[in-house]
Image (cartoon, rainbow, N blue to C red):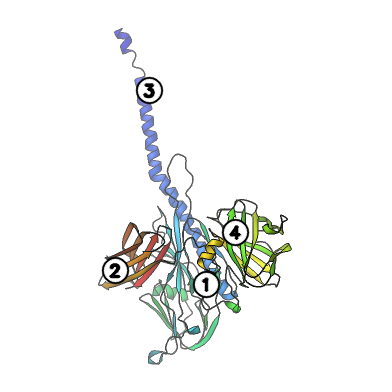
Amino acid sequence: MGGQFWSDRRAVSEVVGAVLLLGILILALTSYQAVVVPNQNAQTEFQHSLQIEDEMVDLRNAILEARSSGTQTFASLTLGTQYRDRIVAINPPPATGTIQTVQQENITVTEGGGQQRQDPIRLDDRPLENQFIEYTPRYMEYQSAGTIRYENTVTYHQYPTGNVTLTSQRLLQDDRVTLAPIEGTINEGGTRRITVDPIPGVLQTTEVVDPEITLPTRLSEADWNQILDDELSGGESLSVDNGELSLQLEGTYEIAYSPIGANRPPAEGVRGGSTGEINPASPGNVQLVGAQWSGNSVRLSFRNSADNSSFTEGRLNFFFGNSDPDELLAVNAPDAGANPRGENWAVGGDFGELDPAIFLEGDRTITELEYVFDQNVNRNQDFFVTTLTLESGEQATYFVGGEFSADDEEENGDNGDNGDNGDTDDDFAFTETSATRDGNDVSYSFTVNAEDGDIETVTVELFADDQLQDSDEYSNIASGEFTSSGTLTRGGGGGSGSPFVRFTAEDTNGNTIVEEISV
């Protein structure tokens, strides 16, 4: 029995081997999760950073095209990205991003120099307002991605270590100064694809002798010297101080001023005297007041505030989002029979006939139009732009996206809202912000209110020398009103960058607001 007992230990080595193999597998999986997954995700984020660079350049080109052509243009941007699918490892949440307009100081144009300089020129008796457009990613691994910004006809990538210009400039060419400031509001975040619709304002030109022009900027003096290159002649100069670019020019210059509306017409009006407005576009009496998304169809509700009319033809200009339809299979008038009025309209194709025409009864009567796509579409992620022609020959362009119904329009008044109103809240605002500098210390205070939701987070950031110096973040606030104050400290170093404090607040509805104060 004893001999048989000692000879029965042969399975011990197999157990030890299995344990060792399991340990090796666990170690390999841990190493893969800790090293390989972050590296692959960083590569995905970097590729998205290159993509959004190109899309911000496209947005800049669309803005300048709208300004030069006098017609509305379109650009799309992919705010975030999804990481590659994995079987055994775990991914973080998708990388997101935010694009927003940020209000700046007004542009000023004055004539003459020194003590003879006149008051700032105000075209249309209004200050020359201005905004920047900024895209900021929220990556998990690629932490030095920086901010991509459009300002003063230039798009550039602001990295922590410096700025890289992505386009040339149209600000100053020969004896012409082109001012195309941004009006309206862009404020979108997440991973989805969104559209921005530049709408050209009225073009105004005036000749100014020896103009001095000041514009807000986040670029340094060295950056502008490189961007403008040989545009300045002898005796002319530029300088950047406290976030302000000053151009001192000699001779007679033509100042061409045409504001660009972001998703809405500029306050000065639109080019050519037509409304140029989206929802409604020209002629303005036929408004889009509802959009109901279901499966592969979208039912549009139009209200005709003028006399009887008809839609005679139309086209689907663009489609953006996670869905990718190729065509409209049918365009129907649901209240007037089952036979299609239009068939097989290609996305981005030519105008298609509506036969017979779709009657639009006047006196604020609602008429429905149904678009049937060749695949299912998603109201939360997809957008499209369509143009319809009236029997008068006038054309109306409509932007359709988001959760929007006729009830929403009635609550908001007779304003023809563009339908993408799920991410904005006029009652969410900073009611007080202040910042004062004492040496390297900046003291700040703020009050923010959100009537239609709770405040989620508030971030206060100090920037100087084109770099983030210090920040405070207030999170999990869960209140409709929040007040706080604190002190931020600027790091060492000089530099030409202008110090400023940026206040950013987000609410529980996904809205974001931003204010900046130079210090």
- The residue identified by callout 4 is 319
247 or 132: nearer the eye? Answer: 132
- The residue identified by callout 2 is 444
Q: CA distance from mark 3 to mark 1?
A: 74 Å
Residue 251 in sight in this render: no
Task: State if disc 3 and disc 2 touch (CB < 8 Å).
Answer: no
Residue flagged by tag 4: what amino acid is it? Phe
Residue flagged by tag 1: what amino acid is it? Gly
Task: State if disc 1 and disc 3 touch (CB < 8 Å).
Answer: no
Q: Which tag, 4 or 2, sits closer to the chain's start?
A: 4
Residue flagged by tag 3: what amino acid is it? Glu
Q: CA distance from mark 1 to mark 2?
A: 32 Å
- The residue identified by callout 3 is 14
Q: Is residue 132 left or right of residue 399?
A: left
- The residue identified by callout 1 is 261
Q: For residue 332, which quarter of the picture? A: bottom right
Query: Where in the figure is residue 307, as x and y percent of width and height?
Result: 67, 72
Q: Which tag, 4 or 3, sits closer to the chain's start?
A: 3
Q: Secondary structure at mark 4?
A: strand
